[in-house]
Amino acid sequence: RNQIHPKWYIRCVLLLVAVLHTRYHVSFRACALILVCMETIFMGLPGNLLGPRQMPLTLGTTFSHMGLQDDKFTLHIVCPECHQLFPRTIDSATRCPECTVDLFAPAKQQLFQAVVATVTGNRQPPSRKPHLVAPIQLLSDGLRDLFQRPGMLSAMNLWKVRHQVEGESRSIQDGEVWNTIKDHNGHKFFFAPGCENEIRLGVSFSLDWFGRKTSNFGPSHSSGVMSF
Ligand SMILES: [Zn+2]
């Protein structure tokens, strides 16, 4: 419980916004407003009610503290013209060296920021937001994360001892590709000499962008990046 937050009343607030969002579809911004208001109240009351640890002020951080969100994606800034990727840490005045277009939109005070500034009295100048961003997780990072999960290693090898029925196709291991695909030496990839002592991973890609959604970063289209 202390991992969520050491103060019990702050844990209650975090639980409240988590339930409001997941059960009653209260938006991310509304949840953030509740969190900012509650933090302002705690700061204004006598005594150090917040304690040494900062209170989460967004729903994403709340889920992360509660162990409910564990995505490993890294946001990259994307040039809206040539789609070149840039690290998230670049200065907001940066232009794409190829197209010389601005990577960030002009600073604009959002209504939500104005409300937060009014509530907290903390008036920050509006920041510039990138025109386009892309969440990326490298395959190597994903595999490392996968193998660190308990039981994954033995699960990877289960197919080697599974019972196969002649003439029946029950899994991907019964398919033609699995049984014929070659490795770089020309041996069968999953049945090469010595492969019983190593793990050979077949990687397949699938893509489903049917559920198109727009956002501030992609107002007229959805985007994704895939390398193979
Ligand atoms: Zn560019």
Image: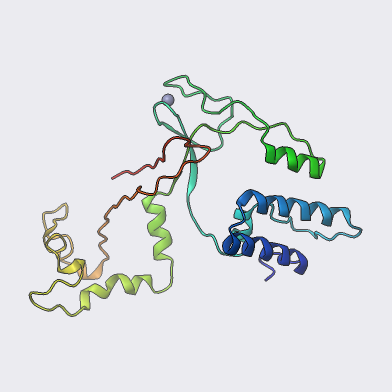
Q: Residue at x 69, y 52 (%)?
A: 57
Q: Is residue 225 above or below residue 61?
A: above
Which quadrant contains ligand 1?
A: top left
Q: Quadrant of residue 15?
A: bottom right
Position in image of residue 221 (x %, y %): 41, 37
Q: Residue at x 44, y 29 (%)?
A: 80
In this rendered view, identify the residue nearer to me: 167 or 84: 167
Q: Is residue 13 above or below residue 150?
A: above
Q: Residue at x 79, y 40 (%)?
A: 118
> Count of labels shown?
0
- Direction from residue 84 to residue 216 in the image, left or right: right
In this rendered view, identify the residue nearer to me: 68 or 25: 25
- Direction from residue 107 to residue 147 in the image, left or right: left
Q: Quadrant of the N terminus?
A: bottom right
Looking at the image, the residue that sits furthest to the top is 100
Q: Quadrant of the C terminus?
A: top left
Q: Is residue 45 above or below residue 92?
A: below
- Direction from residue 170 to residue 57 in the image, left or right: right
Position in image of residue 104 (x %, y %): 55, 28
